[in-house]
Amino acid sequence: MEQSDLDGVIEVERGDSAARTRSVPVLTRALAMLEILSTSRNGLALPEVARRLKLPKSSAHTILVTLTREGYLARSPKTRRYTLTTKFVSLANQAIENLRIREVALPFLRQLMMG
């Protein structure tokens, strides 16, 4: 991997391991953005998102536009507020369908039955 491929990538140490794991800063910021939007009933406008995340408005705007184009956010033309879309519900439903809850729970259920 060339240095240009690593530009914008930071390294973080996990407390449970000496190994270093790379993180992508813009992805970390986008996920933080989704988390703050998920706690807002009426959505948030660009200045509020930027302020809460301590980001320049231009950076926050770029992330918001990308998430909107990909269908994860919707922007109200009237209020200029961003909100999460139901795409997250679809993702969650798919994740739940892929879980093998019975397989995971079976040993615990057997243990409960035995006493």
Image (cartoon, helix red, strand yellow):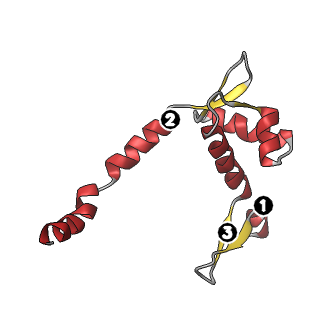
Q: Residue furthest bottom?
A: 18
Q: Amino acid at mark 2?
A: Lys
Q: CA distance from mark 1 to mark 3?
A: 10 Å
Q: Quadrant of residue 67?
A: top right
Upstream in sequence: badge 3 or badge 2 = 3
In the displayed structure, does residue 95 sit left or right of residue 46?
left
User: Which is more N-terminal, label 3 or label 1?
Assistant: 1
Tag 3: amino acid: Arg
Structural distance between the alpha carbons of marks 3 and 2: 27 Å
Q: Image point 46% across, 37% down: which residue?
A: 89
Question: Disc 1 versus disc 2: distance between alpha carbons?
Answer: 28 Å
Residue 64 at x, y = what percent? 71, 37
Which residue does the image show at 38% across and 44% down from the upper left? Answer: 94
Tell me the residue that label 3 is attached to. Answer: 22
In the rendered image, the vertical position of residue 4 relative to residue 92, given as above or below: below
- Asked whether 109 or 58 is in front, the reply is 109
Residue 8 position within the rendered picture, expressed as x and y whole percent measured from the top left? 78, 60
Q: Quadrant of the N terminus?
A: bottom right
Residue 76 position within the rendered picture, expressed as x and y whole percent measured from the top left: 68, 21
Q: Are the residues flagged by discs 1 and 3 in contact, CB closer than 8 Å?
A: no
The residue at the far top in this view is 78
Quadrant of image for the C terminus: bottom left
Residue at label 2? 87
Q: Residue 72 vs residue 113: left or right? A: right
Q: What secondary structure is marked by label 2?
A: helix
Q: Is residue 25 above or below residue 75?
A: below
Tell me the SS state at disc 3.
Answer: strand
Answer with the quarter of the image where residue 107 lies. bottom left
Earlier residue among tags 1 and 2: 1
Residue marked by disc 1: 8
Instruction: Provide the secondary structure element on which disc 1 rests.
Output: loop
- Tag 1: residue type? Gly
